Image (tube, helix red, strand yellow):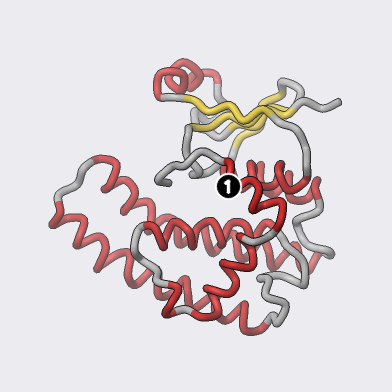
Amino acid sequence: MVHYKLVYFNARGLAEISRQLFHLAGVEYEDHRIEDQEFAELKPNLPTGQVPILYIDNVQFSQSTAIARYLARKFGFAGKNTEEELLADAIVDTFKDFIESFRKFVVGVLTGESEENMKKIREEVMRPAVKTYLTYLNKILENNKSGYLVGNELTWADLVVADNLTTLITAEFLDLKNEKTLGEFHRKILETEKLKEWLEKRPVTRF
């Protein structure tokens, strides 16, 4: 039996989608959450000096998106055909482009940036990026009447976007009362039976 071990901090961050995929697939894995001291000890022996790392029978694999895509394909959440896989990948890549802007906000929060600088990041960096991102998502959902982003079944793209929307709501960049289509999508994904089980029992973290 294959042994999976996922190593990351005690945060949703870059490992959450992989955790969700393991739970949805009903596949056992070791969810190893590390603190800064352990990360410092591990860092010299990591392929890129970063986490998450997925161990498959003690073989290391790095890069959060590559890991999540691998699990999505292995467990049947990548799309039903190559065209659906392409669209799911495109949506995730668009999310990654957007998250570069959001990263500035997260770093500011974690490093205690001044209120003035945080306001500047919110208004000059985040607000325009959020508007562009949400417009893109709305168009995809309006063109696909299933309520999912891709095809008529849950894919890893839905998980990525729904988790990110949760973060945007928490950070007060998104009010779903003003986004009917996105609100319906967000509820649909979070109400997925096996995913809901995970969301109810996972550790509560800010990001």
Q: Label 1: few (<14), some or many (≥20) within 10 Å?
A: few
The quadrant where residue 90 appears: bottom right
| Position in image of residue 31 (x %, y %) | 62, 30
116 to the left or right of 163: left
Residue at image location 54% in from the left, 19% down from the top = 45
In this rendered view, identify the residue nearer to me: 181 or 88. Answer: 181
Q: Which residue is mark 1?
A: 200
Q: Residue furthest top?
A: 41
Left or right? Give the position of 170 relative to 135. Answer: left
Badge 1 amino acid: Glu
Quadrant in which the N terminus is drawn: top right
Look at 54% across and 64% down and name the residue there.
94
Residue at 75 percent of width and 57 percent of height = 78
- Left or right: 97 with respect to 21? left
**Farthest right residue?**
1
Q: Secondary structure at mark 1?
A: helix
Q: Is residue 63 left or right of residue 56?
A: left
Q: Quadrant of residue 88?
A: bottom right
Give the image location of residue 57, x and y in percent.
76, 23
Where residue 96 appears, as percent x and y from the top left, is 51, 57
Residue 161: image location, x then y, percent: 56, 62
Residue 180 vertical placement versus 61 (above, below) = below
Q: Residue at x 78, y 42 (%)?
A: 26
> Could you tell me how many numbered marks the image carries?
1
